[in-house]
Amino acid sequence: MSQVIEKKRRGLHNLAYTEREIWPQILERISSGQSLVGAAKSLQIPYAQAKYHLRQNEDLKKKYYLAIEERGDYLADELVDLADEMPPADLDPSLINAWVNRQRLRIDARKWSASKLRPKQWGDKIDVSVTHTQISIVQALEQAEARLLDVTDITPNEPKTLD
């Protein structure tokens, strides 16, 4: 009992305890789809304490970002299961639309989260390729100058005739 009290007394500054005993559980929960807030709540750890440990430990921060990427993959994989899920058999027929809307919301939230957590893998692919990449600035300036000189050769008193 005194060991638990001692750990609580050390609070935010006990990095060894947190990494060794708590952070593997937090990282596993994040990899399995939970947010840091959800993982901290389920383990009864203050969110501020978790953020403090991330700011203090670069190695832990790298592991956390890897877990976030894995969370994006988990959420994307979950989409198919949610889309294939059938309404419960005992669901009141008047509540089917509400159930479908709830599923749609769950799918949309996971799609959005996955695209933000792993944009290269799950984000929208926008093709911005350019087919002609070689532009000569000198040539463009010469062409502009030639057009300008052609226009200034015409004086208001002398109409230009086409031969």
Image (cartoon, rainbow, N blue to C red):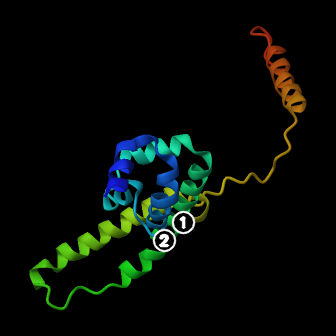
Q: Looking at the rendering, in which quadrant would you find the N terminus?
A: bottom left
Give how far across and how far down residue 161 sits, in percent: 83, 23
Number of marks present in the image shown: 2
| Apparent side of residue 34 relative to residue 135 in the rendered image (left or right) | left
Comparing 153 with 145, the one in front is: 145
Q: Is residue 138 visible?
A: yes
Instruction: Tell me the amino acid under the disc marked 1.
Output: Glu
Q: Quadrant of residue 11?
A: top left
Determine the residue positioned at 10% across, 84% down: 92
Q: Looking at the rendering, in which quadrant would you find the C terminus?
A: top right
Determine the residue positioned at 43% across, 80% down: 80
Q: Is residue 126 above or below residue 70?
A: above
Q: Residues within 10 Å of mark 2 (few under 14, many from 20)?
A: some
| Apparent side of residue 138 relative to residue 37 in the rendered image (left or right) | right
Determine the residue positioned at 84% across, 39% down: 135
Determine the residue positioned at 59% across, 60% down: 125
**Marker disc for residue 26:** none
Q: Quadrant of residue 49?
A: top left
Instruction: Tell me the amino acid under the disc marked 2.
Output: Tyr
**Tag 2 secondary structure:** helix
Give how far across and how far down residue 144 sits, in percent: 82, 26
| Apparent side of residue 27 relative to residue 44 in the rendered image (left or right) | right
Q: CA distance from mark 2 to mark 1?
A: 6 Å
**Marker disc for residue 70:** 1
| Apparent side of residue 49 relative to residue 119 in the rendered image (left or right) | left
Give how far across and how far down residue 31 sits, in percent: 49, 66
Comparing 127 with 106, the one in front is: 106
Q: Pointer 2: what residue?
A: 74
The reply to whether the C-beta atoms of the residues labelled 2 and 1 are less than 8 Å apart is yes
Give how far across and how far down residue 23 sits, in percent: 48, 58
Q: Is residue 46 visible?
A: no
Comparing 147 with 162, the one in front is: 147
